[in-house]
Amino acid sequence: MSAQVIYAPPADIDARRSRSLVIGVGALVLCAVGFFINRDQFFRAWLIGYMLWLGVALGSMGLMMIHHLSGGAWGMVVRRVWEASSRTLPLLTLLFVPVALGMNRLYPWTHAELMQGTKSSGTRRSISTRRSSSRGRRSTSSGGT
């Protein structure tokens, strides 16, 4: 007969939860202040932070998939951590909204007026013409022997 172990959460879980909520609200207020002071820097910082946590979530999901495919007991210890961190993907999808709204501040290729003077079709044509002419020279110079 095996006894079933019942997990009891720590006694101070409510204090930890409320402390985390206060820290999160404080960080959100700092983000709002940064948004109004320097929007370009805000979007750059948001993108870096977003990519960090997206990498954690996707990396955990990848490791979890490898563990499920290979089987075995090598990942049983951290499996719950991988599952929990990969469950943040819906939240990360929502947190992508500021990146999508700030694309014109993050990426210069979203500005049509800045991209007018870059590689036109004529430039591409001349590059491909040079490549084809250099290929022809190589084949004629080596084929004579």
Image (cartoon, grey):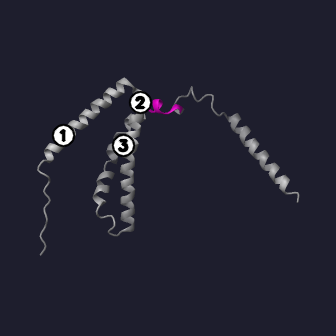
Q: Secondary structure at mark 2?
A: helix
The picture places residue 100, in percent across and down from the top left corner, at 42, 35
* Res 39 label: none
Q: Which residue is mark 2?
A: 41
User: Where residue 19 is drawn, which disc sits there?
Assistant: 1
The answer to which of 114 and 47 lies nearer the viewer is: 47
**Type of amino acid under label 2:** Gln
Q: Measure the C-alpha gap from mark 2 to mark 1.
A: 28 Å
Determine whether label 3 and label 2 are within 8 Å by CB: no
Highlighted magenta segment, given as a residue range? 102-108
Badge nearest the viewer, 3 or 2: 2
Q: Earlier in the sequence, mark 3 or mark 1?
A: 1
- First of labels 2, 1 by sequence position: 1
Check the image and report above or below for 74 versus 96: below
Residue type highlighted by circle 1:
Arg
**Foreground residue, 78 or 115?**
78
> Helix or strand or loop: what does disc 1 sit on?
helix
The residue shown at (52%, 31%) is 108
Quadrant in which the C terminus appears: bottom right
Q: Quadrant of the N terminus?
A: bottom left
The image position of residue 84, as x and y in percent, is 29, 53
Residue 27 within the segment the image draws in magenta = no
Q: Residue furthest right?
A: 144
Q: Which residue is mark 3?
A: 93
At label 2, counting other C-alpha atoms closer than 10 Å, the crowd grade (few under 14, some 14-19, many 20 or more) is: some
Dominant SS of magenta comes to helix
